[in-house]
Amino acid sequence: MKIIKRTIQILGINLKEIFLFEILYRLTTGVMFLSLFTRGMALAIQYSGYSYLTTKNIGMFLVKPVTVLVMLVILGVGILFLLVETSALLAAFQAGEKCERLTTNRIFVRGIIRCRYYLKVKNFYCIGFNLLLQLVFQYVLLIKSVTHIKLLNDIVEGIGKSTRWSGTIVFLAVVAVFVFLPGLFTVHFGLLNQREGKEALKESFRLVSRHTIHAVLYLFCLNIILYGIFRLVLLALAFLSAVIIYFFVSKTIALALYLTAYNWLEIAALGMASIVNGVCNMALLTGLYYTYRDEAGLAPELLVSEEKQRSRRGKKTRRALIVLSVLIFFAFLYDVVENGIQLAKNVLVETEITAHRGSSMEAPENTLFAVQLAIEQMADYVEIDVQLSKDGEVILLHDKNFKRTCNDGRSPWNMTLEEIKKLNAAAYMPGHERAYVPTLREVLEYCKDKVNLNIELKNNGHDDELPYKVSDLVREYNMENQCVYTSTSLPFLEQMKELDEKSKIGYILSTAYGDFSQNERVDFFSISSSLLNEKNITQIHETGREIHAWTVNTKTEIERMKYLHVDNIITDYPVLVREILYREEDTENFFEFLMTVLD
């Protein structure tokens, strides 16, 4: 009980300020790290000749010099963020031990001041044990988080299938625990008592050796309790989201929306749990440290404020640090919003969903009705087909004429936009209200910041200017990061790449014979699902390119594409695909049980 009371005192004095600091710090550093990671990975992928990473090509990618350099920078920044956070928490707990109240910004500044300790060469031991501490405390949450990150999940699945690698991981985990235990208080002796690395490790070993089982038992019980709370909170959030969906969402998309919502709720819950887990574990560890230190008769350390940090120069330093941090944060935030979101999303999402010509089974294809419905049905992409009118306007149409959809046999290159606008694009769908043929400009205006677009450039022999006009329109609306381009015409795709080297182009194949996967001019292949198998998917992925499968409409074929790990499923039924992709038996059964009770 003495240890629990001391831990509560250490944490309680500045409880609000500590959690406010953690939330603000994680958000700030998260935005900065996301921007750095996406920019760095994009750079490494570009100079390594890949556009897509898998477990098959990740080995070659990681050993390339540019990748090594980028990864070292990213790792270094991540470690620095972690060291500042740990230093700030220990400074706050130290103040709590002395019953001193701190503001959030003072916690941050003291963390920066304490972090300078790590920069000394002799203190690298403390950096290692700091990282090990976080790994041990957060390992359950880290394992759960890995399932939401495509590449890491693939790697873990691959390791799980290998007895040799699984045994190696278990062995390393056991070694890590034995290394971790003697150094349990290395960071505390280093940061709070200003001991050098080796001396801090020796002091920790002497203190831990008398209380090993006692300390491990406390930490083990705390983590069991925290994990139980995490599961209960996640269950409560799942119940709340299910109730909201039941009362406010159409039943046709209820299950798909719930499965998607649960996936993102789990990610958010993992983020908050990592904060609570880190704070509580470090607080308990600090409580154990102070209790064992007093029992051993060791002298107390000096408080940061007793080390002449309240001077005028110190105040100016604090203000400068805060202003600099705010400026850096907003610079990175702007970069993430403008450029980094798409790559970050691709890191998290395993298989994306494209609505074929919009949600074309329930609304007229290639119309704003179909596009709007695709967005409502949570499609990641909307695929549209574009051609040129007689007067050079980019309009939406799949066929070479309007006969099937508009009951008019004329072709777009023989009609002006004014004539095309008089047609009824819903003529082939009895009972649906009249729909006009939209222009690409109208679709871009509607879709900006709402959904991604797969723009298929139709090659009808009359559209030589099509790539230039499409590129100009996308650039005009600043939607380069929202659009990919596909075509059966390689010259069209090459022109799109020449107009914007960062554009993402996909070659549409209705046959898949020969060594087409070695075509280095395209970023992905759009292939009929009937032609896909494990062999050719592996070949394409090994070259660092994605696979978009079309048109996948049956439950059996959707399940097969999920098993084969295609990157994008093009379908007329985006809701059905989402239900199957995100399906987890326990989660789905829970939702169906709630629906039965509420009915």
Image: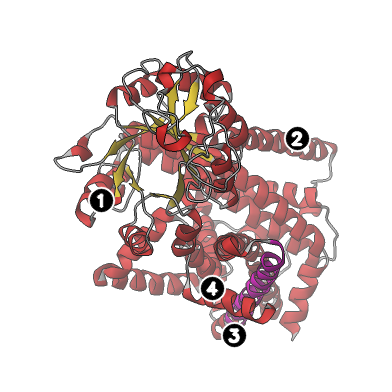
Marks 2/1 in contact by CB < 8 Å: the verdict is no
Q: Amino acid at mark 2?
A: Val
The local crowd at label 3, few if under 14, some if 14 to 19, many if 20 or more residues have their Cα within 10 Å, is few
The local crowd at label 1, few if under 14, some if 14 to 19, many if 20 or more residues have their Cα within 10 Å, is some
- Residue beneath disc 2: 323
The N terminus lies in quadrant:
bottom right
The reply to whether residue 76 is visible in this rendering is no
- Residue beneath disc 3: 214
The C terminus lies in quadrant:
bottom right
Residue 584 against residue 151 in the figure, above or below = below
Residue 85 location (% of width, % of height): 65, 54
- Residue beneath disc 4: 587
| Element assignment for label 3 | helix
- Residue beneath disc 1: 537
The local crowd at label 2, few if under 14, some if 14 to 19, many if 20 or more residues have their Cα within 10 Å, is few
Residue 408 location (% of width, % of height): 44, 29
| Element assignment for label 2 | helix
Q: Nearer the viewer, residue 181 or 530?
A: 530
| Element assignment for label 1 | helix
What residue sits 50% from the left and 66% below the top? 144
Q: Is residue 484 magenta?
A: no
Magenta residues, dominant SS class: helix
